[in-house]
Image (spheres, helix red, strand yellow):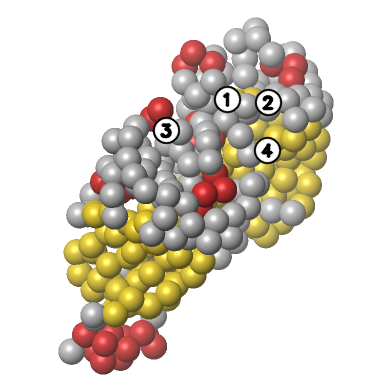
Amino acid sequence: MISVFALVVVCIGSVSACLVKVDMEGATATSVGWGGVASRTIDGSINGVYGGLSCYHSKDNKENSVTAQLKGHFLGITYPISTVKVYNRMDTCCDQRIDGATVWAGDHMCGTIVFDAAKVVYEFDCNGTEASTVSVALNEEYLQVCEIEVMVDEDKVPVVPEYHNAALGRPTTQSSIGWGGAASRAVDGNANQYWGGRSCTHTGANTGNWWSVELDNEEYVNSVIVHNRMDCCENRINEAQVWLKRGDEYVLCGTIEYDESSSVYSIECGQWGSEVKITNDNSYLTLCEVEVIVMEEAPSEAMDEDVEAFQ
């Protein structure tokens, strides 16, 4: 079961405005430097010392942002966001760089950080803005964020349907292997998007490539989440296609359109299937993680379809 997990409850006033800190789906960033991957912003640790391995770091000092996705993001679920907390780096290096960073709930700007050497955390009122992501953005400076927390009114937390990643640890195959990039790396549960992390696949040829994962059963696949490589060759993923095997045939779920501002792609399927296949005829195929999102309870209209497809 994957659902909202309230880590902290804060009640304001005698009558009740109880806020809960909600769980996250994942995190992405425009760039990563010095090993400071985006997932560090949602790892539950507010350790502000960079050596503690819990702070995000951008690759350069140009246009930077890091985005945290709330649980259910891939299902289109939004939350009425009350406040966002941003924890800064605090090890006497570079903490002033956070000055001028903007904090967003979806497309709504909640505020701008004004650096204060005495502050560990900056808190912003987002006025109940409905959103499924929160972001911190900063231009013309390195961006470093050690944790992002999102608070929502306890009475308004949405219900997140139960679902799981049906690809995790399942058998995989691919058209060829290059540079040690075995197919199984895409379902190892590690979404490290850097080749040096040894968790990305790589084909040996640059045309006619494919990768596939066999599911345990015929499943109702809501969507397929593809984590692209970030340290090189990101545009190779352009026009890769995601397929779902139904019976003896493959049906197309969708085509990935490369976006330099995104490193994770969600392809909707909304169909029953027993295998997910990703093809790329134009370049090497490299996948740093593939998640197959399966609903614990399929939509009622899909139940009859399942019977027809797999009888």
Q: Say left or right for 280 vs 235.
A: left
Depth check, mark 2 against mark 4: the one in front is 2
What residue is drawn where x is 45% and y is 65%?
241
Instruction: Tell me which label, 3 or 2, sits earlier in the chain.
Output: 2
Q: Which residue is mark 2?
A: 60
Q: Which mark is residue 33?
A: 1
Helix, strand or loop under label 2: loop
Disc 4 marks a residue whose amino acid type is: Ser
Disc 1 marks a residue whose amino acid type is: Gly
Q: Which residue is mark 3?
A: 195
The answer to whether mark 3 and mark 2 are in CB contact below 8 A is no
Disc 3 marks a residue whose amino acid type is: Trp
The answer to whether mark 2 and mark 4 are in CB contact below 8 A is no
Give residue 100's quadrant in the image: top right
Dot 4 crowding, Cα within 10 Å, few <14, some 14–19, many 20+: many
What residue is drawn where x is 52% and y is 34%?
231
Locate the N terminus and report the quarter of the image it occupies.
bottom left
Real-space Cα separation, disc 1 to disc 2, in angstroms: 7 Å
The answer to whether mark 1 and mark 4 are in CB contact below 8 A is no
Instruction: Tell me which label, 1 or 2, sits earlier in the chain.
Output: 1
- Measured as percent of width and height from the top left, residue 234 is found at 54, 44
The answer to whether mark 1 and mark 2 are in CB contact below 8 A is yes
Q: Nearer the viewer, residue 68 or 274?
A: 274
- Measured as percent of width and height from the top left, residue 259 is found at 63, 52
